[in-house]
Each structure stands twice: as C-alpha cells, then as structure tokens.
Amino acid sequence: MLHPLENLQWGGGACRVELFLEPTCPFSARAFAKIDELLELAAPGRLSIHVRLLSQPWHQFSPLVTRAILAASAGVGGRDAARRVMDVVFAHRDEFVLADHCTGPLLDRSPRQTLARIEELAGFGIAADFADPRVTTQMKWHAKYARQNGIHVTPTVMVDGLVAADMSSKDSAQTWLARIDELAWA
C-alpha cells in the first residue's frame, strides 16, 4: 500500500496542487474532471496533482465510498483502480446520494449492497482491500490532513500549501492554471 501522499497523485511536477474532494459531490466531480486537462495544459513536469478525500456527513454514503476509493488504490491497479472508482461514482452519482440527503429508495440499501454496486460499476473487486485496517489509517490521514489545513468544504484547492478559496469548480481548467501559476512557489 502506498503512503497517503502518493496513492492518489497524478503528474510529477514541483508545483503541488491538492484537490480536496468529496466522492459523491457534484462540484467535486467537476473539479476532478479537470485533472487531465490541467496536466495537459501545464508545461511538462510542472504540476503534481494530489486528490485528498474529505467525507462530508450530509452525503450519507460518503464514508463508504471514500473507503472504497482508498481500498481500490491499495489493491491491484493502485491509483488507476482508485481513479476508475472515482470515475464510476461521479458518473453514477444518483446511486450513491439520498434524495434531498435524507429520503428515497437508497435508504434501504445496505453498505454491503453499496460496495457491491461500486464493484459492479468499476468492473473489479475491492471487498478484500476494503476490510484491510490500513485503509482505516488512510481514511483517518485524509480527514486529519484536511482539518490541519482548515479545509471544511469540497471542492477546495490548495497550491503549494496555500488554500485558493477563490478557485471554483465552475472555472475552466485554463482559469485554474492561471491562478495556480499566480500562487505557485516554483
């Protein structure tokens, strides 16, 4: 299992961009979708993009989905498997969010059924890694790291340790890159 600083990282540049995302949040989905474009727009070797998972209590399946992503990253396929889980959860968000955060047929879905649905959508199993106690350690790390940096909402962007509260998921990748360049140490 990779250290939490490495298991959800894309790119290898000196400028560290950290995306604090909640895996069932529609705004986090928009931010997540910018990763590849940011890496393409930036000079080669410029950015290192790290996803930090921040479970939000009003998204009822958020802790389970967060754990599923970390479990996928710990298993065969590593970060690519984690990326696949994030992709399918964001693409099928209605299957992981209660209506109005508190009603609807998903109230009858068990955690085991939810995990099985994630596995079905992703096309691979993660149940064994889901039960690994080291995944709990990673979940705690992500939560502590967010709190230590004053992150309470998603998506939030941090560039080289500076929170960029003015970066919105509605902004284009080009707008993000310009703001990243303003904030970057490198």
Image (cartoon, rainbow, N blue to C red):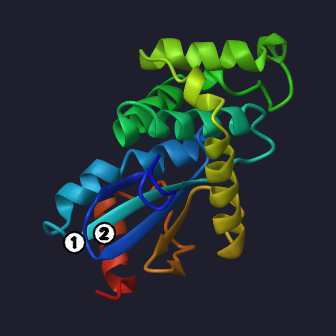
Among the 4 quarters of the image, the one containing residue 106 = top right
Amino acid type at circle 2 is: Leu
Among the 4 quarters of the image, the one containing residue 16 = bottom left
Looking at this view, is 141 or 24 the one in front? 141
Q: Secondary structure at mark 2?
A: helix
Image point (63%, 35%), residue name: 132
- Please name which of the two marks, 2 or 1, marks the residue nearer to the observer: 1
Label 2: few (<14), some (14–19) or many (≥20) C-alpha neighbours in 10 Å: some
Label 1: few (<14), some (14–19) or many (≥20) C-alpha neighbours in 10 Å: some
Between the residue at mark 2 and the residue at mark 1, the CA separation in whole angstroms equals: 11 Å
**Number of numbered discs present?**
2
Q: Dot 1 corresponds to which residue?
A: 46
Q: Dot 2 corresponds to which residue?
A: 177
Question: Which circle's residue, 2 or 1, is located before the other in the chain?
Answer: 1
The percent coordinates of residue 74 (x first, y second) are: 48, 39
Q: Quadrant of the C terminus?
A: bottom left
Would you say residue 54 is visible in this rendering?
Answer: no
The percent coordinates of residue 46 (x first, y second) are: 22, 72
- The correct choice, above or below, for 121 with respect to 29 in the image is above
Q: Check contact, mark 2 vs mark 1: CB within 8 A.
A: no
Image point (52%, 75%), residue name: 164
- The correct choice, above or below, for 177 with respect to 160 in the image is above
